[in-house]
Image (cartoon, rainbow, N blue to C red):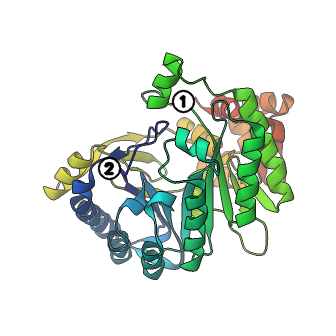
């Protein structure tokens, strides 16, 4: 029987952050109830069509999933369990923002089977949180982490951002130290990027805010790599660290993406991938609800991938995994050709530049390649 990872998009936020270009909206609370009902319809339709396949991971993202009530989140997860064969040891994650959670919501989620949380902390500095438009304080972020543990969560990720305009290395180091003191099982660190169409992009264009300094961001990234290694964290993906130990704390859901494996996306604007085709839903929340209420498909469009593009995409996502990279055996099983035969020129060039290296299983980035990873990825795409 086939296996699918499941992503569920919750597009609601209390306030939209100025740097965000995701399919998220503030002020649409009136649509939350019909949206949950539409999600249930879409989930059940896919489960019936696919014959209730196995599901090893479920991930609620957004937006802010925890703008929904604990009961609503549990209802959606219940629909997934009815429509799919969710494995007993499945990783079931929800993103959560510290300003939208409390012990009751965490307890309800834990009782329903959620076993992993990803808290969007972003910073432990209140001035930086204010600049980023976050609705929580550093103290509230810490409280949310402790509330999660009190509710029984023992697999928690913290998101942090670096490379903010005028951010100082010392401030970044304090955020890292505070995160390490909490000892979460997982950390995700992202450089701030200026996305077109966002308020942040307008601020930069108007001169109100200086653009992020790429060199400063690279130094902060290097600092994080060193600090987290000393603190016992395993740097397994460009932006992700897992606490080292007997248990593997890597995010199993995201490993599906990085290994170029199939997944189903439910909700407004959600994307799906079966290995050969990619398709995506309509983005407007009202449009998504309307289509499903009329018994229509929410799919807006799709793309059939030719083999050359698929090979390049597998390199792009797989090379993000710093330890395993792209195993030659997995590539051969997928395309019937070795990495060397498929990309001899590209691999030779990148190897000579010291950006990629061969290891026992296949090809991976060198540490020098980490900082210019996007340049490496582009070389493999058609």
In this rendering, the label closer to the viewer, 1 or 2: 1
Horizontally, is 176 left or right of 70 in the view? right
Q: Where residue 309 sits in the image (x, y, percent)?
A: 54, 36
- Crowding at dot 2, Cα within 10 Å, few <14 / some 14-19 / many 20+, comes out as many
Q: Is residue 93 above or below residue 166?
A: below
Horizontally, is 322 left or right of 275 in the view? right
Tag 2 residue: 268
User: Callout 2: helix, strand or loop?
Assistant: loop
Nearer-the-camera pick, 166 or 62: 166
Residue extending farthest to the left is 294
Q: Which mark is residue 43?
A: none
Which of marks 2 and 1 precedes in the sequence?
A: 1
The answer to whether residue 206 of the structure is visible from this angle is yes
Nearer-the-camera pick, 299 or 213: 213
Q: Is residue 332 above or below residue 118?
A: above
The answer to whether residue 97 of the structure is visible from this angle is no
Quadrant including the C terminus: top right
Q: Which residue lies at the image location 46% right of the left edge and 65% below the top edge?
A: 101
Residue 259 sits in quarter: bottom right
Q: CA distance from mark 1 to mark 2?
A: 23 Å
- Crowding at dot 1, Cα within 10 Å, few <14 / some 14-19 / many 20+, comes out as some
Residue extending farthest to the top is 206
Residue 25 sits in quarter: top left
Q: Is residue 225 above or below residue 186?
A: above
Marks 1 and 2 in Cβ contact (< 8 Å): no
Q: Which residue lies at the image location 66% right of the left edge and 34% below the top edge?
A: 377
Tag 1 residue: 194
């Amino acid at each position: 029987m086939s296996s699918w990872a499941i992503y569920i998009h919750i597009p609601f936020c209390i306030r939209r952050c100025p740097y965000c270009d995701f399919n998220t909206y503030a002020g649409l609370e009136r649509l939350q109830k019909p949206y949950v009902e539409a999600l249930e319809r879409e989930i059940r339709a896919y489960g019936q069509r696919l014959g209730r396949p196995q599901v090893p991971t479920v991930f609620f993202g957004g937006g802010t999933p925890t703008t929904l009530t604990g009961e609503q989140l549990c209802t959606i997860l219940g629909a997934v369990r009815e429509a799919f064969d969710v494995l007993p040891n499945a990783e079931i994650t929800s993103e959560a923002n510290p300003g939208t959670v409390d012990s009751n919501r965490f307890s309800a989620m834990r009782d329903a089977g959620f076993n992993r949380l990803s808290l969007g902390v972003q910073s432990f500095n209140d001035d930086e949180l204010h600049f980023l438009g976050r609705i929580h304080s550093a103290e509230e972020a810490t409280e949310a982490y402790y509330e999660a543990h009190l509710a029984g969560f023992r697999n928690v990720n913290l998101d942090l951002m670096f490379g903010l305009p005028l951010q100082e290395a010392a401030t970044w180091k304090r955020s890292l130290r505070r995160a390490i003191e909490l000892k979460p099982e997982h950390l995700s660190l992202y450089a701030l990027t200026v996305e077109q169409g966002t308020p942040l992009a307008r601020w930069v264009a108007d001169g109100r805010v200086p653009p992020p300094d790429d060199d400063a961001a690279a130094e902060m990234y290097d600092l994080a790599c060193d600090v987290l290694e000393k603190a016992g964290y395993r740097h397994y993906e460009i932006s992700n660290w897992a606490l080292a130990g007997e248990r593997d704390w890597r995010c199993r859901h995201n490993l599906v993406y990085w290994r170029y494996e199939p997944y189903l996306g439910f909700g407004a604007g959600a994307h799906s991938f079966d290995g050969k085709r990619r398709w995506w839903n309509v983005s407007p929340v009202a449009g998504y609800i309307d289509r499903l209420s009329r018994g229509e498909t929410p799919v807006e469009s799709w793309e059939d991938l030719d083999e050359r593009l698929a090979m390049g995409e597998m390199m792009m996502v797989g090379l993000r995994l710093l330890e395993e990279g792209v195993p030659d055996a997995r590539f051969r099983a997928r395309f019937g050709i070795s990495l060397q035969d498929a990309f001899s020129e590209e691999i030779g060039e990148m190897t000579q530049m010291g950006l990629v290296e061969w290891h026992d299983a296949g090809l991976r980035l060198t540490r020098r390649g980490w900082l210019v990873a996007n340049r490496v990825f582009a070389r493999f795409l058609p």
